[in-house]
Image (cartoon, grey):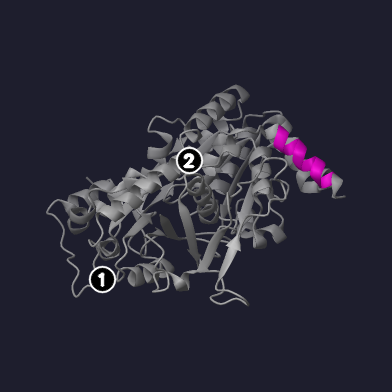
Amino acid sequence: MRIGIAWECPWVSSSYGKLALWLTSELLKMGVDVRLYCPSVPEYQLYSNFTLYSPSCVYRDIGVCVDLERPVEVYSSNWLCRDRDRDVDVYVISGSPYGQVESEWISRCSRVEKPVAGYFVTESDIVPSLLAHWLLHVDAVGFTTRAVANAYLVHESVREIHGDWVLVPHGLPDYYYKFTSDAIIDCYFKLCEERGVKIREDPGVKLALESRSEGVLYGTVAKDHPRKDYGALLAAFSRVKHSCVSEKLPFCDKIRVFLGFIRAVGVPTWLINTIIQLLGLSSSDVLILDERLQESGISEFSLLFSYSLIDVFVFATMGEGFGLPPVEAGALFKPVVVTKTPVTEEIWGGDYPLLVKSRPIVVSEGFILHVTDYVDLARKMSRLISRRYARRAGLSARRVAEKYTSKRMAEAFLKLVELAREKRGVKKPHPLREYRASDSPDYREIVLKALKLI
């Protein structure tokens, strides 16, 4: 069987790019043939119309690599669901179905005879009716969490067709569970020194190590995007610093925050330096990823180094389709503080002690997202100054992360593919003459409950 997967390119240093690679690797191990389609491949190349890809791993000897059993064909997504793809048995479209790129894929694939599955996410607690109706144009759907499923299936016409959806959580490769933070840091420094890079002499690294020695280096790694709430993180951090000084603790000058601020895969949103000045913080309080790396993105080994360097991973967010970075950090025994949303509550568990209070809001595009409670975020960050509490929290985060492996993702993904084959022909060609926007009588009540208005 050959599966054609439309997603981000497997060499892109983003969550979607990594997941495409990790999923492909696991499927190949299971004897499944895979063809990838992604936006950033030229439609025509000098001698072919596809790239034969296998990752070149600089850090293979260390173990930070996912090898493919054989190279995989990567096509421009312009070739997705075309006549020449007669050797593809099932197509799977991944991402947000109403996004500009994904919606084009769905529109084209809704007209092919082959079965088509959707592997979908959303950041909204409830997806508006017309956007949710994009699901009518695939034969079967899989969702990353039950909360994401509920966001779509609240609409009766969608639920009638896809009530048999499949849970396909994201997952991490084995190497996330094999390292210790100290080992990663030692290895990183050694490799830098072998290449003549005096990383230990970098002023920012010196400050970070000074804070790490006291167990008070907070941090995050997230793209520059409206949903990643850098404002909440920095405001809460400012309160943590202020409270420390007020209580006259001996290490207040060592409390710092590291921002793995990635512009390469986001939407320009956050004016970090302006926010730092607004909050009365200094450049020695907030350590920011090198500007060159902000623009280019960072390698997987550099990402592991960033997670390992910090003592507490803080993920202030307005909404998630899954939230991969906190799970990655948790796999390295880092305490994870994360904004409470339906998705993060499901992943981390309702009794997870470091879920931060939030308030649901309606935003401009008609989504229900969440505003982080700055005070509660600061309170939970301050708790982790205690090393004993931080160690316990790190163990709890690791137990959560161990549930999410790339092998489990691939096994669930194959169930989605089989469901699409069973339901072949269910999808409706896009566009429909009319989309039934009316919902069940209790729909308004469901929305009001999501907004905590009743």
Identify whether 37 is placed above or below 334: below
- The quadrant in which the C terminus is found is top left
Residue toward you, 258 or 432? 432
Element assignment for label 1: loop
Q: Residue at x 26, y 71 (%)?
A: 429
Specify few, some or many for label 2: CA neighbours under 10 Å numbering under 14, 14-19, or 20 or more. many
Marks 1/2 in contact by CB < 8 Å: the verdict is no
Give the residue type that dot 1 points to: Pro
Q: 10 Å neighbourhood of mark 1: few (<14), some, or many (≥20)?
A: some
Mark earlier in primary sequence (1, 2): 2
Residue 197 percent across, percent down from the top left: 84, 50
The label on residue 56 is: none
Q: Which residues are magenta?
A: 183-193
State the CA–CA distance, disc 1 to disc 2.
33 Å
Q: Is residue 423 visible?
A: yes
The residue to which callout 2 is attached is 407
Look at the picture and state if 37 lies above or below 223.
below
Identify residue for label 1.
429
Is residue 45 in the magenta section?
Answer: no
**In the figure, 429 relative to 232: above or below?**
below
- Residue 362: % across, % down: 33, 57
Magenta stretch: includes residue 186: yes
Q: Identify the residue shown where x is 38% and y is 44%.
A: 412
Q: Amino acid at mark 2?
A: Lys
Quadrant where the image shows the N terminus: bottom left
